[in-house]
Amino acid sequence: MARALALAARGDYRVGRNPRVGAVLVREGRVLAEGFHAESGGPHAEAACFAALPEGASAAGGTLYVTLEPCGPFPGKRTPPCVEAVLSHQLARVVVASADPHPAMGGESLRRLREAGVELRVGVLEAAARRLNGPFFKAQRGVGLPYLTAKWAMSLDGKIACRTGHSQWISGEAAREEVHRLRGEVDAIAVGIGTALADDPRLTRRGVPGGDPLRIVCDSRARLPLTSKLVQSAGETPLLVAVREDAPAARCAALRAAGAEVLACPPAGDHLDVAALLAALGARDLRQVLVEGGGGLLASLFAAGLVDRVQCYLAGRILGGASAPTPVAGAGVERVELGARAVHLESRPVGEDVLIEAFLRAY
């Protein structure tokens, strides 16, 4: 199953809204074939695995390891039901990491396999399979909110910039390239107005395949300059500026005239209501949002309990400075036990840096 999960992880932006799924076919202790879902509308993992069988080889009597319950018939599906393919190959055993969470699908294929006499085991490395497809599993729960990833790069002493504000570059080239790949896979990327003013970013993916996400600036008072790269490129890549309902009308009108969409949100203290913003994005069926700062926006999101995952690129530098900014600003919690706590942590090297991935919820 670990191998099937590694195969599933090869799925990228091309799978679209579909889950990333991997499959491994074994018979008599020997791997006969492997497969994974590579693109939306293409063969699912099980079909790709069966297609990879060597000429003349038979799957009959073998075991299929698959990271998600094989799909059954479903209106609008562009591919044949995988459960039919599994049954046609006369497997003796099927091992599944997780049942399908879709209300119209979950459990039906498992029932059919059991009724056909196939030995079935469900739940092997289930938590890992669910983490791999967090946005998909969250969407099936019907909560109406996108899966939110908070991303930052920081020094060993927890600084995202020097006391002077200089921050380019804390992370190395490999980490920056990986972030651009992630940008190509999410539905939207968001920053606060402080980051937009300080860095003047474009918030597009560069040098990697994929699509450019919707760009979002949380800008309570509509301060985003019309000369910014974000506004200047609004005709090429969609830009949404989220403002408070009481933001200056003239500034909002100017942003609209320049090609940006302006979304009015209810106030929350001195800022806009980030929960209302996320609900509005969910209503548009945006499933994945990447937040790249700044500290004020992240503080609001953590305080509202809206962050699902943290991706922290840790660089081998010490910056120091009592006034140097940290990833999450705001007042902070008053006691350690009140802070957001990860339910699972992973780490791996990315070039000269280390990525620490913290999952704050299990779906």
Image (tube, grey):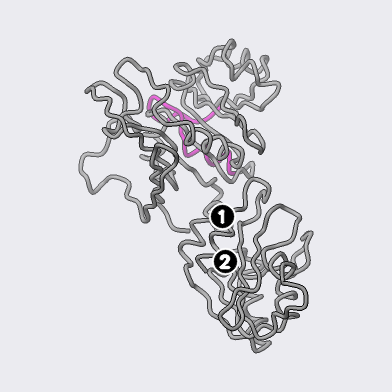
Stretch in magenta: 264-282
Camera-nearest residue between 166 and 221: 166
- Amino acid carrying mark 2 in the image: Thr
Upstream in sequence: badge 2 or badge 1: 1
* Percent x, y of residue 156: 29, 34
User: What secondary structure is found at the residue carrying circle 2?
Assistant: loop
Residue topped by disc 2: 67
Residue 240 in the magenta stretch? The answer is no
Camera-nearest residue between 4 and 134: 4
Cα distance between the residues tagged 2 and 1: 11 Å
**Vertical placement of residue 15 versus 107, above or below:** above
User: What secondary structure is found at the residue carrying circle 1?
Assistant: loop
Looking at the image, which residue is at 59% across and 69% down? 66
Looking at the image, which residue is at 60% across and 78% down? 94
Looking at the image, which residue is at 41% across and 28% down? 294
For discs 2 and 1, the disc positioned in front in the rendered view: 1
Looking at this rendering, what residue extends furthest in the bottom direction? 117
Q: Is residue 146 left or right of residue 35?
A: left
Q: Quadrant of residue 210?
A: top right
- Amino acid carrying mark 1 in the image: Ala
Residue topped by disc 1: 9
* Percent x, y of residue 50: 72, 71
Camera-nearest residue between 248 and 21: 21
* Percent x, y of residue 342: 35, 51
**Vertical placement of residue 146 versus 28, above or below:** above
